[in-house]
Image (tube, rainbow, N blue to C red):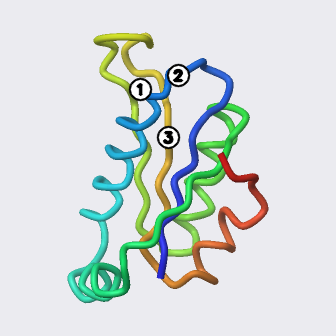
Amino acid sequence: MKQTIVARTDIGMGRGKLAAQVAHASLSAYEDTGRKARKRWKGSGQKKVVVKASGEEEIFRLAEKARTEGLPHAIVRDAGHTQLDPGTVTTLAVGPADDDLVDRVTGDLSLY
């Protein structure tokens, strides 16, 4: 099992901002996951992969694909307290779910 977090590369997030947004996405999608899958993922090491998205449009396209596949997912919008404007879409988490299912949505993306 794994979870993939898709982060935008076009908005100039600093390293700390990126780390925070990835954490928000991971936790939000985890909370959208069923109890049995959460337990399996936690027991198998909580594998995570962070990949690149070119922009907001790609984030929404991938989120729709995850929804269609029935996968847990979460889009994060920044609160706007530091580097970004309020409501800026920053990341998408897909999973945790079986690797092959997550890869149907995010498998073609480059590592961050």
**Can you identify the residue that label 1 sits on?**
17
Query: Residue at horizontal 35%, vertical 59%?
Result: 29
Which mark, by number, is residue 13? 2
- Tell me which corner region of the image, top left, top right, bottom left or bottom right, holds residue 100: bottom right
Q: Position of residue 31 (x, y in %)?
A: 24, 63
Marks 3,2: beta carbons within 8 A? no
| Quarter of the rendering occupied by the C terminus | top right
Labels 3 and 2: the sequence-earlier one: 2
**Can you identify the residue that label 3 sits on?**
91
Separation of disc 3 and disc 2 at Cα? Answer: 11 Å
Q: Position of residue 38 (x, y in %)?
A: 27, 79
Observer-nearest residue: 88 or 52? 52
For label 3, count other residues whose C-alpha is less than 10 Å away and answer few (under 14), some (14-19) or many (20+). Answer: many
Q: Is residue 58 left or right of residue 37?
A: right
Residue flagged by tag 1: what amino acid is it? Lys
Residue flagged by tag 3: what amino acid is it? Thr
Query: Residue at horizontal 52%, vertical 22%?
Result: 13
Observer-nearest residue: 76 or 51? 51
Q: Position of residue 12 (x, y in %)?
A: 60, 18
Q: Is residue 4 left or right of residue 100?
A: left
Marks 1,2: beta carbons within 8 A? yes
Query: Residue at horizontal 37%, vertical 25%?
Result: 78
Q: Position of residue 52 (x, y in %)?
A: 67, 44
- Residue 48 vertical placement versus 1 (above, below): above
For label 2, count other residues whose C-alpha is less than 10 Å away and answer few (under 14), some (14-19) or many (20+). Answer: some
Comparing marks 1 and 3, which lies closer to the viewer? Answer: 1
Separation of disc 1 and disc 3 at Cα? Answer: 11 Å
